[in-house]
Image (cartoon, rainbow, N blue to C red):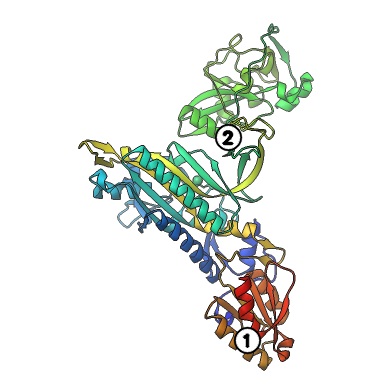
Amino acid sequence: MRQSKMFIPTMRETPQDADSLSHRLMLKSGMIKQMASGIYTYLPITKLVLNNIEHIVREEMNNIDGVEIHMPVLHSRELWEESGRWQAYGDELMRMKDRHEREFALAPTHEEMITALLRDELKSYKKLPLTLFQIQTKFRDERRPRFGLLRGREFIMKDAYSFHSNEESLDVTYHDMYEAYARIFSRVSLEYRAVEADSGAIGGSHTHEFMALADIGEDTIVYTTESNYAANIEKAYCPVPEPPELSAMKAFDKVATPGVTSCQTLADFLEINLEETTKTMILKVDGDFIMLLIRGDHELNDIKVRDYFGAQDVEFATDADIRDTLNASPGSLGPVGTELPVYIDHQVKIMPDYPTGANVDEYHYINVNHERDFEVAGYGDFRFITEGEMAEDGSGKVKFMRGIEVGQVFKLGTKYSESMNLHVLDENGRSVPVLMGCYGIGISRTLSAIIESHHDGRGIIWPKSVTPFDVHIVTANHKDGLAREEAETLYESLSQDYNVLYDDRKERAGVKFADSDLIGLPYRIVIGRSIKEGKVEVKPRDSETAVEIGTEEVHGYLEKNY
Ligand code: ATP
Ligand code: MG
């Protein structure tokens, strides 16, 4: 392809409004153009890379007997009412009406649509197992679209769905998918980890996320170096601590704590460590208020709370709610004397004689002991693990790193087949709900993740498996007739074996080199002054050194090195 005919609107200045490295590099190298918040046009270079990623994904899906289809993006409200997700999906679901005022969603995912398709077509278990997939635009009205293609409101996803008549068959496909994902992310040159994850709004029982390692990642991966344990922090269990030796409990007392509104100010006031304080929170779990205690230095994990209660929705009570229910402010809450059910984190369970709020502003109780001073409705794991604690598998102390979720595999079980009535007749002629799995890859997010880990100060460094072109031929001075002629000849001959981008623009050499580094193709061949001696300069994008070789040697060089 001749660059003069391409559309690569590179920028000289670094875009200021971009909030991640890949976002900046994609804008600067003329790969994307933002059309609205979280909505982008994919310019030619992006399109070429997406095609390459999709090609790899298709190969690996076909490899495990995945069959490609293409479903509608517009989904009727009635369809989503069947699964209950018209309400449950909340504000992330993009909604619209047609001319008859009928309501539709722009699909964020396709469980409902594919379940509806299969219930009309599948009659017998003999058709199972079956795996269908598509690569398509998805819509999610994200609260905070950001980081360019990493979190868009319109993005490309590969979504696959599998159907089974028994658990073993679902296990086999889940395992095949897991392996296929591992191959896909290796082939696109991402350093990744597969981590245990929470099943979130899609539901289901068993799931792994594939995380590309990157500092910009919005997810925290908890892992140990002693074993292959890795989990999303949302999910990572905190080990249940050993109960301490029993000792006499101290006398309970009420103290004035003027100016104390946080665990830290309370610890300072009482001259104790933050770990010796407790935090009392009022939460609204599917509309009902509960009280929950965790240690003062810990953070609440609302996802664990949601899972503990099997709830759809967990939110913090507002200050007004708290005033109404307890007549106190958030800084002085406590479990003694409350009518709310009180739940306690495992780490508080082993604490004796701790302080809590007194439900009276600027007063606290000290030497509180659960079960002696108040009733406990339940104990659980309600907090985020912290670095240095023992891992769930007991292999060693956990460490943290950041990851970008590029894919996820789920065992859905019968969640959708039961609510939407997808049944088949089994071997004995009985009607049974079909078991399902679903498997997503963020194609456009994967592209950004690749850039996050393959770049330098000058631009992108494309891995060969996804690069938009293999070789960049650049004339240093396009007015030089001999250089032009030789470049044309090289372009014609190399194009037989490689995808070549030929910079035939009449730009200054500096501009052309800067653009070439930005675009980041694996090899650059510069036709400069030494073409008079029949020589060109070849430079791999990931190296600082160029070599000068004769034009007739270029083919051999690439054959050897590419
Ligand atoms: P996240 O937690 O990042 O919001 P998710 O878990 O909601 O993602 P899934 O429903 O698992 O996403 O979707 C499958 C894949 O689609 C994800 O693994 C991710 O790679 C991609 N994806 C999800 N949301 C977006 C988005 N807003 N922009 C780009 N890709 C996305
Ligand atoms: Mg996910």
Image: 325 above or below 166 = above
277 or 315, which is in the foreground? 277
Image: 257 above or below 472 = above
Q: Residue at 58% of width from left, 66% of height from top? A: 464
Look at the image and tell me in which quarter the N terminus lies.
bottom right
> Is 63 displayed left or right of 453 in the figure?
left
Report if the beta carbon of the residue with label 1 is closer than 8 angstroms to ligand 1: no
Point out residue 242 in the picture as x, y percentages from the top left corner.
Answer: 63, 19
Point out residue 93 in the picture as x, y percentages from the top left corner.
Answer: 44, 48
Q: Nearer the viewer, mark 1 or mark 2?
A: 1
Residue 90 showing in the rendered view: yes
- In the image as oriented, which residue stretches furthest toward the bottom? 481
Q: Residues within 10 Å of mark 1 (few under 14, many from 20)?
A: many
Mark 2, residue position: 236
Q: Report the amino acid beneath label 2.
A: Ala
Q: Are marks 1 and 2 in contact (CB under 8 Å)?
A: no
On residue 487, which mark appears?
1
- In the image as oriented, which residue stretches furthest toward the left? 429
Q: Residue at 57% of width from left, 55% of height from top? A: 150
Point out residue 164 in the picture as x, y percentages from the top left corner.
Answer: 33, 43
Q: Quadrant of residue 509?
A: bottom right
Q: Residue at 62% of width from left, 30% of height from top? A: 394
Q: Earlier in the sequence, mark 1 or mark 2?
A: 2
> Is 290 displayed left or right of 434 in the figure?
right
Instruction: Kindly state the secondary structure of the residue where label 1 is placed.
Output: helix
506 or 453, which is in the foreground? 453
Q: Report the amino acid beneath label 1.
A: Ala
> Is 81 displayed left or right of 39 in the figure?
left
Point out residue 182 in the picture as x, y percentages from the top left corner.
Answer: 52, 51
Look at the image and tell me in which quarter the C terminus lies.
bottom right
